[in-house]
Amino acid sequence: MKRFFMVLLVVAAVCSCMPEKSGIIQVEVPERPAGQEHVLGLVTEPLDTVRVGFVGLGMRGPGAVYRFTHIPGVKIVALCDVEADRVASAQNILKEAGLPEAASYSGSTEAYKEMCERDDIDLVYVATDWVHHAPVALYAMEHGKHAAIEVPAAMTLDEIWKLIDTSERTRRHCMQLENCVYDFFELTTLNMAQHGVFGEILHVEGSYIHNLSDFWDSYWNNWRLDFNQNNRGDVYPTHGFGPACQLLDIHRGDRLKTLVAMDTKAVTGPRCVEERTGEKCESFKNGDHTLTMLTTENGKTMLIEHNVMTPRPYSRMYQLTGTDGFANKYPVEQYCLRPGDNAPKEVNHENLTAHGAVSEEMKAQLMGLYKHPIHKELEAKAKTVGGHGGMDFIMDYRLVYCLRNGLPLDMDVYDLAEWCSLVELSRISLENGNMPVAVPDFTRGHWNDVKGYRHAFVE
């Protein structure tokens, strides 16, 4: 028994967390520095033209450059990547769009610093490998730029707190580029939920299940497989987690409270390493399948899953269970509504049953009725420009729209913090025998100031 407590103390010291008598591991929440205020609802001076510099032009970056050529009120000022040929390739995107060449930066992993030091950039768009996301964004904000960061924006709690503190201190936006919250089923369903169609939402689910066996070679210097090999937990949570958090108004009337993580052993990961290197893999930390269960302050629950190893059909599960209805995406998009007065009048004429989904015809009618204003404006162009079916374009357009109009962004730095925190918090739970872990209040006491998640629009 004495040895058990000694081991527990060592683990707690390493991860700056301690189990209380309740059996829940408490994670340190640093005090907000004196004179620093939260950035809930942050608005900044409207920008007539958003001058942008891109860092990282491997898999995601070129697509972002292309999409920005289709957004009004944008000037692409600079392009940066470790590899000079990638910068040159991105310059061709500008040329084909009839735009002037941008300034080029390349040659080292710190080439972005010179770019961020320019005085003619408003926004730095970060699409590097994961471990460089936070350092680039921090440097950008320190030099007066807004930061937009690909997912996951931060891989550790230390990075998360640095991003929060820097955003609060500099009063610069720090947004995670989570595209899935703009997908057509998700945003329509969110609009339905905000109109009370499902009653009170009690449980939500999200996932990222995507066999990456055909993609490992696409990641520069093998960074993604290496990260999975060296880190346990849900290392890529935000695609499923973000839409689920929006449904539950996280830090806008409710907050994440505790989580418990579980995983399978690693089988496919070591096999991938051995096939690629020809050497025996002695250690691979990330399990083939990871599950994280969460509770909220208001008594709601979540289930988030991660699996990039096994041969399963692609799934970004998006599911909600409400007192008056149910919604599900993958493998089949469907809605189920309780019969009675709470059902929308448009579906009352259907023979509703709590045991089955509404018809495809009625589903289409509901999705038309509750089409989100963002989709009404952008769907046609988004599907033409593309980017994961159009949701990437909508994400980028909304970012520019809010900056140009001096509006709060659709996702703030606390969304970034909550959605990325699963990376380290799930690891802490797993490495401590699946113990519950308290999720920090990243707003430091302001999670209930805003009542309900909403997108901002010009009146």
Image (tube, rainbow, N blue to C red):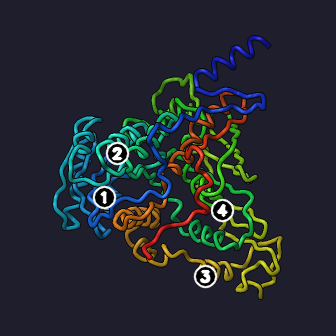
Q: Secondary structure at mark 1?
A: helix
Query: Looking at the image, do the residues carrying marks 3 and 4 touch, with CB atoms under 8 Å apart?
Result: no
Q: Which residue is mark 3?
A: 369
Could you tell me how far apart the alpha carbons at marks 3 and 4 are, in whole angstroms? 23 Å
Give the mark nearest the N terminus, 3 or 1.
1
Quarter placement of the C terminus: bottom left
Residue 325 occupies quadrant: bottom right
Dot 4 crowding, Cα within 10 Å, few <14, some 14–19, many 20+: few
Judge from the rendering whether residue 190 lies leftward or rightward of residue 379; answer left or right: right
Dot 1 crowding, Cα within 10 Å, few <14, some 14–19, many 20+: many
Observer-nearest of 117 and 445: 445
Disc assigned to residue 348: none
Q: Residue type at mark 3? A: Leu
Could you tell me how far apart the alpha carbons at marks 3 and 1 are, in whole angstroms? 34 Å
Q: Secondary structure at mark 3?
A: helix
Could you tell me how far apart the alpha carbons at marks 4 and 1 are, in whole angstroms? 32 Å
Q: Is residue 216 visible?
A: no
Disc assigned to residue 65: 1
Q: Residue type at mark 2? A: Met
